[in-house]
């Protein structure tokens, strides 16, 4: 699935979930928002700094 352009840090973060709507729009959702209200569900992009960032393992 293609990732939205200019996402910033979230694109490399283990907590990111890419959500695609039926109309073909793609959003970057932060899964930390489910447990911590300090994190917006859909962060304003690009995210340049985030205390919750954890790098995704590379395949
Ligand atoms: S924790 Fe931060 S960097 Fe990671 S997906 Fe959420 S907002 Fe983006």
Image (tube, grey):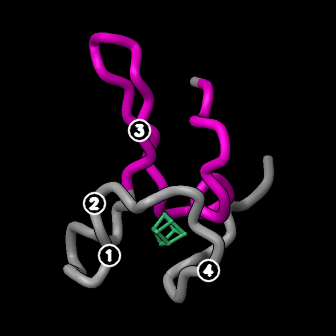
Q: Is mark 1 within 8 Å of ligand 1?
A: yes
Magenta extent = 2-29
Q: CA distance from mark 4 to mark 3?
A: 18 Å
Residue 20 belongs to magenta span: yes
Q: Which mark is residue 39?
A: 1
Residue 26 belongs to magenta span: yes
Specify whether 4 is left or right of 39: right
Q: Which residue is mark 2?
A: 41
> Does dot 1 land on a helix, a strand or a loop?
loop
> Does dot 4 land on a helix, a strand or a loop?
loop
Query: Where residue 28 sits in the image (x, y, percent)?
Result: 44, 46
Q: Residue at x 40, y 14 (%)?
A: 24
Q: Is residue 43 above or below residue 2?
A: below
Q: CA distance from mark 1 to mark 4?
A: 12 Å
Q: Which residue is mark 3?
A: 27
Q: CA distance from mark 1 to mark 2?
A: 6 Å
Q: Residue at x 57, y 77 (%)?
A: 53
User: How dense is the environment of label 1, judged by Cα within 10 Å: few (below 14), some, or many (20 and up)?
Assistant: some
Query: Where residue 16 sits in the image (x, y, percent)?
Result: 48, 55
Q: Is residue 11 above or below residue 19?
A: below
Q: CA distance from mark 2 to mark 3?
A: 10 Å
The reply to whether discs 2 and 4 touch (Cβ–Cβ < 8 Å) is no
Which corner quadrant of the image does residue 44 belong to?
A: bottom left
Q: Which residue is mark 4?
A: 49
Q: CA distance from mark 2 to mark 4?
A: 16 Å
> Does dot 3 land on a helix, a strand or a loop?
strand
Residue placed farthest to the top in the image? 23
Q: Earlier in the sequence, mark 2 or mark 4?
A: 2
């Amino acid at each position: 699935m293609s990732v939205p352009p200019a996402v910033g840090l979230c694109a490399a973060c283990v907590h990111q979930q890419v959500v695609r709507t039926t109309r073909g729009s793609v959003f970057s959702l932060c899964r930390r928002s489910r447990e911590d209200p300090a994190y917006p569900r859909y962060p304003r992009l690009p995210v340049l700094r985030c205390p919750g960032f954890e790098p995704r393992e590379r395949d």
